[in-house]
Amino acid sequence: MYVNRQSNRGSSSTPGRGAGRGYFARGRSNFRGRPVEVPRAASPPLGEILERVQTHETDLIEFSDSEDENDNKEQEHSASLKIVNCKDVATFNWMNKATPTILVPGKPPAWTPLHSPRRLPEDGGAYFRDKNAAQYPSRPIEPAVQALLTLNPNFPTSSIDIFACNSTLGNLLRHVFNRVERPFRFLVEAVGNTVFFVRRENSPTQLIDAVRGFGHTFPEAYTTWESDVRGSDTHQRIVQYEFGGLNFLVRFAADGYYKDLVPNDTTPGSKLSDSPKPTDESSIDDTLALALGESTIASRLSTSITLSSSSSSPSLSLSSSSSPSSTSSPQVQKEQKLTILQDGSQLIPRAAVFDIKTRSVRKKDTGILAGELPRLWAAQNPNFVLAYHQSGLFEDIEETDIRDDIQRWERRNEDALRTYADLLKKIITFARARKDGKFEVVCSAVDGLVFREQGGDDVSSTLSSAVQDRWLGKKHPVKE
């Protein structure tokens, strides 16, 4: 059931709404302007085939508003094929800094709809496919691990079977449902008991091809970064849950939050000092536990793009041009030290967080939400904003609590989810059985799903040695 809430949400008094912000979520970035011609990086070389994987592909069962016999089978639905015990364990924001910097905990931009609709400009410019890889190319998932261990120094890491991003899990789901639209690949590495899935594009700085529509300009106009998280690029969250007898940590980007869904007793997180305390990898073992803040941030910054052809893969230099409160955006480098800013942001519950999609009004009633449910299920994102436009004018915005829809989708697709769980277990077992714990999953129209040796000479370990030791519970002497 859709609930249209935009007419009574009011407006924000925050100055500059809709300007001076950038957006990163599912491939968005803060580059603005006309489309940029960017050399396309070649795919990384493929390693030797280790195993061809046969999976029983299953048709996706979508839902309608009417009940059917499947809605009455909840008691028969296998408990192991439901996501259970879902909780938020960490959040962080990528910051606009000259070097890779995250703010822990994070906070999403607030929903601040316009007083009255106005025609928005179409998206233009260049947008990273994988923001985390672009910010930290050598080890894209390590900042999420750092954020988790900063907020939870005693987190029981040995209990986790899979640490992955929502995009990678979504690709595996699409494979199971036989809905893969483009080839995908990801690196796999077992670190102790945990098997990490690391998304792999052709290049960490690969850009989205042929950007069209209003998927970037709409969030820029309808959400606002608040003062305590100003200067952020994107908000990332990590949830923990159980599915198929496995324990997951899943990182995903969230698009914003509703202020009126935040409980009145929500308090700011504890602070280490009056100003954020920078922490780098050499001193992270000294970190104190902080109160967890669930949040997301996406800074809306106009930027210029500079291409450097000094190496085989082009590098991008981002420079801010419109936000006086932010520093220059990060320069993409292969090896950089991660800085962690610790501050006490307001704690935003996951129930207040939402995901955004925009579509032409001509696409209405074409099952858009149904197509998004697998991705939203994997992230357990409870709210969905679906904004329809006519040539950039948004006069129909549907804001929906989708928790019931997700549960219904989960019940109706039990057979496919069983195949998905079996595939995940196969990947885990294969990784744990290998001496180095490493291989690569590659899916293409030609070969199907294949396990391969990791291809290329520039593949780093998933975690740096210091962070890996922390994950494995090894103690290091505190540096004075």
Image (tube, rainbow, N blue to C red):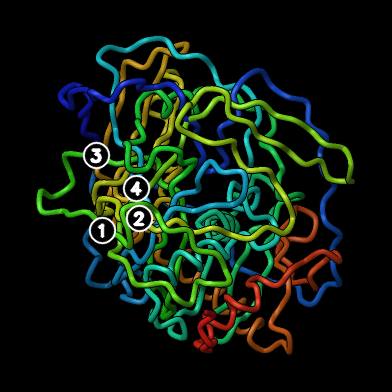
Rendered location of residue 354, percent (x, y): 33, 43
* N-terminal label among 2 and 1: 1
371 on left or right of 4: right
* N-terminal label among 2 and 3: 3
The answer to whether residue 327 shows anywhere in this view is yes
Q: Nearer the viewer, mark 1 or mark 3?
A: 1
Q: Nearer the viewer, mark 4 or mark 1?
A: 1
The residue tagged 2 is 343
Rendered location of residue 101, percent (x, y): 54, 52
The residue tagged 4 is 107
* N-terminal label among 2 and 4: 4
CA neighbours of label 4 inside 10 A, class few (<14), some (14 to 19), many (20+): many
Report the residue at 82% width, 64% height from top.
Answer: 458
Given residues 459 and 82, the one toward you in this image is 459
The residue tagged 1 is 269
Amino acid type, residue under disc 4 in the picture: Lys
Amino acid type, residue under disc 3 in the picture: Tyr
Rendered location of residue 288, percent (x, y): 36, 72
Quarter placement of the N terminus: top left
CA neighbours of label 2 inside 10 A, class few (<14), some (14 to 19), many (20+): many
Given residues 436 and 413, the one toward you in this image is 436
The residue tagged 3 is 258
Report the residue at 55% width, 64% height from top.
Answer: 280
Secondary structure at badge 1 equals loop
